Amino acid sequence: MDKASHLGDRLRRPSGIRTLTLGDTRLSYVPDGVATLKARMLLPDPTEEDWVTHAAYLDESGHLVASVGGLLVERDGRGLLIDAGVGPLTVGPPMNPFGVITGGALLDSLASLGRRPADIEAVALTHLHNDHFGWAWHPASGSDHPAFTAADYLVAEPEWTQRHFAEAQGLGDMIKALEPHVRTVADGEEIFPGVTVKLTPGHSAGHAAYVITADRQRVVAFGDAFHSPLQISHPLWKNTFDHDHQLSTRLRHDLVLELAKPDTIGFGVHFADVPFGHVHIEHGRSAWRPIDA
């Protein structure tokens, strides 16, 4: 039996709002919805015996459950949003043969955190997949324009210059809607007080993580480098979603070691109801230990 079984239903349900305060910086998971993913399609390497061992990660229908949303970073009265959910949509087969993604709650979640879309000065995207920039292109209710009218959309330069990969997946009209607001950013660039870009290509051609430094700690918002905390324990398992499988597995291996360093916290936007956590390595095995934020 997987040691993660002690987390109970948390691995099989999406996260609600969870907030972590580090000194003068407040970090909040902002829910938009939920994805139910076909586990054996997403992760083809595990055997049936592996899935029996890791049954704690699967719901009653055998799906991996993933949260969909973003990370709100607040400091000195300012607000940055990292990723923007899928928007008020349900995306399933054939566009998404791996399962069903349903969104729509992100603006209400922001309101519960005391923030209006107009308060967000920038939306930093980890990559150009539609479950990460939904509210950056989709018109807000009662409007012809997206909700974040005052925000720049920050995209890593190699992701934006290779946006043809996203366009080839049927996202061309969405990408065009983003374009007037996009500002490209570079590896190591500070985009908000204490927040820097970390290029992490593999899942997409120019995928980026964001590193938040506060109160002598680092929080690594690693986007889709990992989709499930199960991958922390098995970083070399292939993920069908990835653009470059060899690069992705090498990146996950390196990120596990990075996340295991002292004073380092990980943030997994898709990590069910355990979005904030530490990586613990013991006897050569790594595991995700959630922070009850």
Image (tube, rainbow, N blue to C red):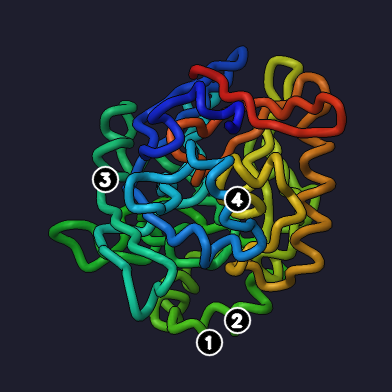
Tell me how far mark 2 sits from mark 3, CA to CA: 28 Å
Amino acid, disc 3 = Ala
Percent across and percent down for residue 8 are 43, 26
Tell me how far mark 2 sits from mark 4, CA to CA: 35 Å
Percent across and percent down for residue 80 are 51, 40
Q: Give residue 149's mark.
A: none
Residue 184 visible in this rendered orientation of the protein? no
Amino acid, disc 2 = Phe
The correct choice, above or below, for 171 with respect to 65 in the image is below
Q: Earlier in the sequence, mark 1 or mark 3?
A: 3
Q: Earlier in the sequence, mark 3 or mark 4?
A: 4
Tell me how far mark 3 sits from mark 4, CA to CA: 37 Å
Amino acid, disc 1 = Ala
Circle nearer the viewer, 3 or 4 = 4
Report the front residue among 103 and 257: 257
Q: What secondary structure is found at the residue carrying circle 1?
A: helix
Percent across and percent down for residue 55 are 49, 41
Q: Please rate how many residues cluster around mark 4, counting C-alpha atoms within 10 Å: few if below 14, some from 14 to 19, many from 20.
A: few
